[in-house]
Amino acid sequence: MKKVINTADAPAPIGPYNQAIIVGNTMYISGTIAMDLQSKQLVKTTIKEETKMVMDYIGAILKAGGCTFDNVVKSTIFLNDMNNFVQVNEVYASYFKGDFPARATIQAAKLPKDANVEISVEAYLF
């Protein structure tokens, strides 16, 4: 049986999906971008600030599902420009203590709402 996770502390979905789904002992968090919660507009500042916003939103979704970043086992980062890889890594790494999850980083031709970064994660509920 699946459980839908949505929180007001992260952007509402912009399409026919949920922020996260829990099936068994696994939580799947949808791709998250840097959208302002009130205006629902994309926030474009620096790549570091956008990445921090995305990671904070992921943290809120994890919390709503009873998890923390310690539960994350896999992440996928989509970048509009691979030249931002080092800066995104600096911010991303600061959210984990100890072992890092498995990860893929992909340069995408275009992201939703022309975002610079989108991140999705999978977490194991232990």
Image: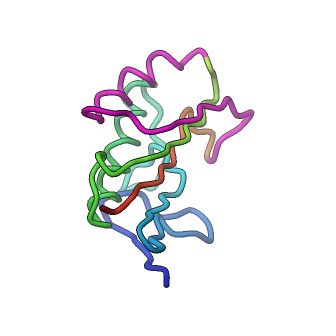
Q: Residue at x 45, y 43 (%)?
A: 34
Q: Residue at x 52, y 64 (%)?
A: 13
Number of on-image labels: 0
Q: Position of residue 11 (x, y in %)?
A: 42, 58
- Residue at the extreme right: 109
- Residue at the extreme bottom: 1
Q: Which residues are magenta?
A: 83-112
Q: Position of residue 48 (x, y in %)?
A: 39, 24
Camera-side residue of 85 and 38: 85
Camera-side residue of 33 and 61: 61
Location of residue 13 with respect to 113 vertically, above or below = below
Q: Give the position of the C terminus as an image quadrant.
A: bottom left
Residue 64 horizontal side relative to residue 23, left or right: left
Q: Residue at x 37, y 41 (%)?
A: 55
Please, which colouring scheme is shown?
Answer: rainbow
92 drawn magenta:
yes
Q: Residue at x 46, y 65 (%)?
A: 20
Residue 90 horizontal side relative to residue 68, left or right: right
